[in-house]
Amino acid sequence: MQRFILILGLALFCNCTWAQKIDTHHLNPDSTNYPNVYVKKVAEDSLQSTFAIWIKGTVQPHFHTQHTEFVEVLSGKARMTLNGKTFIIHKHDKILIPRGSVHSVTNLHHRPLKVLSIQAPKFDGDRVWIKPLT
């Protein structure tokens, strides 16, 4: 019985060390003195990357060649374009951005837009910017 309790205790401890609750209410940039976009890594493993992102202005159109992105708006209001469709996003909205989908965001508030971005698989810098036609 003691062996069972010890094994159960170790299993629960190991499981708890890998799990993570993200306290988004107290998640802040390390500085407010950033030009437009501030990105803070929250978690990462071989299967995903999770970032808190603050946007003061605009994120130009781009897409990701290797991963899907899931975004939850934590605070603010913005205009988002996803594959040619434009819509307004607010706090608590969740947006699925499939791999290869062109997307952009323009903040509509005086405070930065704050989002949680989960990217799978692990983000490896596969962002491709769309150059405007001139």
Image (cartoon, rainbow, N blue to C red):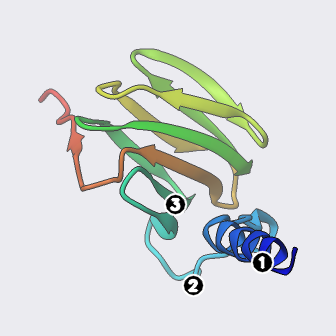
Q: Please, what secondary structure does the residue beneath circle 1 have?
A: helix
Name the residue carrying label 2.
Answer: 30
Name, please, the residue furthest toward the right. 1
Vertical placement of residue 125 versus 40, above or below:
above
Q: Nearer the viewer, mark 1 or mark 2?
A: 1
Please state which amino acid type lies under the numbered disc 1.
Arg
Q: Which mark is residue 51?
A: 3
Q: Nearer the viewer, mark 2 or mark 3?
A: 3
**In the image, 43: left or right of 62?**
right
Name the residue carrying label 1.
Answer: 3
Name, please, the residue furthest toward the left. 134
Q: Quadrant of the C terminus?
A: top left
Q: Which mark is residue 38?
A: none
Q: Please, what secondary structure does the residue beneath circle 3 have?
A: strand
C-alpha separation, residue under disc 2 versus residue under disc 3: 13 Å
Q: Residues within 10 Å of mark 2 (few under 14, many from 20)?
A: few
Please state which amino acid type lies under the numbered disc 3.
Phe
Q: Quadrant of the N terminus?
A: bottom right
Q: Earlier in the sequence, mark 3 or mark 1?
A: 1
